[in-house]
């Protein structure tokens, strides 16, 4: 049986309609949540960032004032600076540590499962609980760090002082995240072609040379991905800071998200500032995400 | 090599064979030495990463005098269980734990269905706007919850849902990671399968339910682990979305011990140890899926 052109077109339209209907039917439950609880709040941040007032009660339009005042606002530049320093030091430490652990794990012949288990365990600890645990490490009197220092005959240190607290927060973050990225890198290293390494070994390349000229270049994009994602995560540091140091001493560990939270729930009429500073962070993260997407796309050769 | 060539000339085959055996032995020895040094390094690193847990478990088994004792007792004997009793009697700990498990389970179950359905649509059905939707999800994937608390609070407030379970459960459903992952997995399924199913007269929903879901079961388990642990750890949104003690989740409750309770190291250590129990149990059962969590990011590519 042959279909007339008109019949054919009608059937095609019908199939098209069916695709449209079933496609959106499957997508809508998730997409509706996505729009209401993510897209709308992102746009909402833009709206709030131009308002002056509190969460409940009236607000008025102030244009860009919140952004220009951000610079003079007590604590805002400090919070941004703290967050940048935090991310700038925790990200390299985490990724270098993770890469080292991954290289050891990937070449291991036996017993890898035990180490993977142990290395990954801190990853599963919620930030709040991790901070609680670190109170027992950093306590001046009975903390693990000072106990070890005393045992080897060194002077105990006040770990959560103004100039050390941010460093402790970085160390906590390294402890909590190094296992995550180590597992990520192990999978990437195991996936590298083995023949190249055998060839290099026959040519007499030292382990260091093999790492420098083979592993590192082949992992370049994977590492770039890890840098972007872990930087974005580091920007959001909050729960460890609120429990371990409560943002102090003297604001030394007050981060951007901490400041946002304080503006909203600690004092009145600063919701606009909170949104302005949030928007700065969102834009920074979107920019990183888009750079990331471009990089990944270019690898596929203009796919 | 020069040494080998020389020896061939002077002493012949036997010597060459001996040298080769020596060489192989030396290589084996070097390999063993390298393996051993890896074990030493990894053992040290693991020890450093795990020591904090040991130290806090130790502290939780000491009374308030023994905690401050120097040098510290490395094995507190007899163990002091009072700190755990205090957590159970002086705080709402079990209720916090229940809330966390209830919210995390509900979010995980709902997301499994929402995300696999959305992933199926994005991977296999050709509808208008598919590409735009996917791109929007990718772009907003990394937007942090912490930056959205103001509009999210006012939104939930306008629904009249602040300080309810709905406030805890609804916003996490927006996270696009699951749908993106599911799309990736479903794209990898062979097309023949669904074509055959379609010829057999199955409709889209039957294909999703009877063909696709069973095939992506391993991916669903990984997704469940990601969702559950993320929810277990979430803090800032539950902190501001709920206020009554009956509704706060574990992370918020534990943080409140530090914020309001005064200094009580016994209470802190015992509650920290107890908080880790559920996720540790899950980790023992689902190790493989947990380790795959790290790959979720990579799968996005």
Image (cartoon, coloured by chain):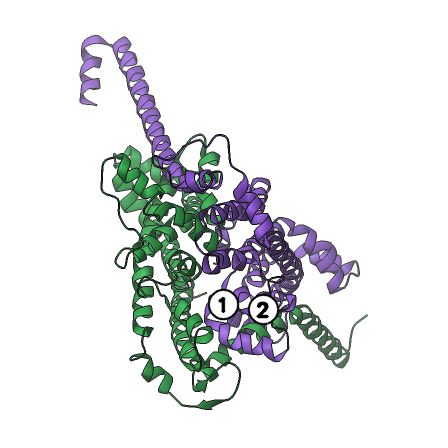
Local packing at callout 1 (Cα closer than 10 Å; few below 14, some 14-19, many 20+) is some
- Mark carried by residue B235: none
Front one among A102 and B245 = B245
Residue A270 placement (x, y as % from top left):
42, 80
Q: Chain of mark 2?
A: B
Q: Earlier in the sequence, mark 1 or mark 2?
A: 1
Chain identifier matching the green colour in the rendered picture: A
Determine the chain carrying the residue at label 1.
Answer: B
**Residue A187 screen position, x and y as percent:** 45, 45
Give left or right: position of A121 versus B14: right
**Cβ–Cβ under 8 Å for marks 1 and 2:** yes
Rendered hue of chain B is purple
- Identify which residue, B280 or A199, lies in the foreground: B280
Residue at mark 2:
B171
Q: Residue at x 25, y 36 (%)?
A: A206
- Residue at (38% x, 41% y) in the render: B68
């Amino acid at each position: 049986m042959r279909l007339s052109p008109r019949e054919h077109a009608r059937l095609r339209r019908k199939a098209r309609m069916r695709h449209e209907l079933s496609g959106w039917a499957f997508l809508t439950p998730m997409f509706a949540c996505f729009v209401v609880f993510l897209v709308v709040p992102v746009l909402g941040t833009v709206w709030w960032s131009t308002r002056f007032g509190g969460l409940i009660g009236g607000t008025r339009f102030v244009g860009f004032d919140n952004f220009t005042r951000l610079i003079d606002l007590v604590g805002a530049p400090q919070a941004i600076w703290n967050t940048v320093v935090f991310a700038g030091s925790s990200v390299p430490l985490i990724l270098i540590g993770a890469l080292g652990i991954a290289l050891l794990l990937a070449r291991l012949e036996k017993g890898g499962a035990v180490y993977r288990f142990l290395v990954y365990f801190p990853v599963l600890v919620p930030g709040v609980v991790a901070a609680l645990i670190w109170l027992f490490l950093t306590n001046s009197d009975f903390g693990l760090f000072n106990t070890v220092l005393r045992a080897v005959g060194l002077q105990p240190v006040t770990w959560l002082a103004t100039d050390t607290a941010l460093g402790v927060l970085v160390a906590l973050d390294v402890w909590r995240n190094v296992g995550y990225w180590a597992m990520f890198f192990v999978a990437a290293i195991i996936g590298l072609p083995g023949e190249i390494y055998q060839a290099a070994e026959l040519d007499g390349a030292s382990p260091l040379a093999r790492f420098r000229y083979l592993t590192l270049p082949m992992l370049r994009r994977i590492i770039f991905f890890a840098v972007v994602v872990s930087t974005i995560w580091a920007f959001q540091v909050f729960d460890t800071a609120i429990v371990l140091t409560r943002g102090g001493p003297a604001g030394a560990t007050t981060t951007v998200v901490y400041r946002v939270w304080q503006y909203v729930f600690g004092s009145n009429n600063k919701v606009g500032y909170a949104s302005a500073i949030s928007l700065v962070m969102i834009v920074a993260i979107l920019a990183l995400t888009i750079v990331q997407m471009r990089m990944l796309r270019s690898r596929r050769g203009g796919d | 090599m020069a040494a080998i060539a020389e020896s061939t000339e002077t002493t012949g085959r036997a010597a060459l064979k001996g040298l080769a055996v020596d060489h192989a032995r030396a290589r084996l020895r070097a390999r063993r030495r390298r393996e051993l040094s890896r074990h030493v390094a990894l053992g040290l690193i693991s020890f450093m990463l795990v020591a904090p847990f040991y130290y806090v478990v130790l502290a939780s088994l000491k009374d308030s005098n023994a905690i401050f004792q120097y040098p510290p007792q490395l094995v507190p004997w007899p163990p002091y269980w009072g700190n755990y009793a205090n957590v159970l009697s002086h705080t709402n700990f079990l209720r916090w734990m229940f809330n966390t498990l209830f919210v995390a389970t509900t979010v995980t179950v709902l997301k499994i269905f929402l995300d696999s359905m959305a992933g199926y649509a994005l991977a296999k059905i050709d509808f208008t706007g598919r590409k735009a939707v996917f791109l929007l999800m990718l772009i907003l994937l990394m937007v942090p919850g912490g930056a959205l608390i103001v509009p999210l609070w006012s939104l939930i407030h306008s629904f009249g849902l602040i300080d309810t379970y709905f406030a805890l459960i609804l916003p996490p459903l927006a996270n696009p990671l699951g749908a993106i992952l599911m799309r990736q997995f479903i794209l990898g399924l062979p097309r023949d399968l669904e074509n055959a199913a379609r010829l057999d007269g199955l409709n889209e929903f039957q294909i999703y339910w009877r063909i696709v879901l069973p095939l992506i079961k391993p991916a669903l388990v990984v997704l469940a682990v990601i969702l559950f642990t993320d929810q277990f750890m979430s803090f800032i949104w539950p902190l501001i979305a709920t206020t009554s003690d009956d509704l706060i989740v574990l992370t918020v409750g534990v943080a409140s011990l530090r914020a309001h309770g005064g200094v009580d190291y016994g209470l802190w250590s015992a509650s920290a140890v107890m908080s880790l129990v559920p996720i540790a149990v899950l980790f023992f059962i689902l190790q493989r899926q947990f380790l795959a969590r790290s790959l979720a990011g990579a799968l996005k590519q």
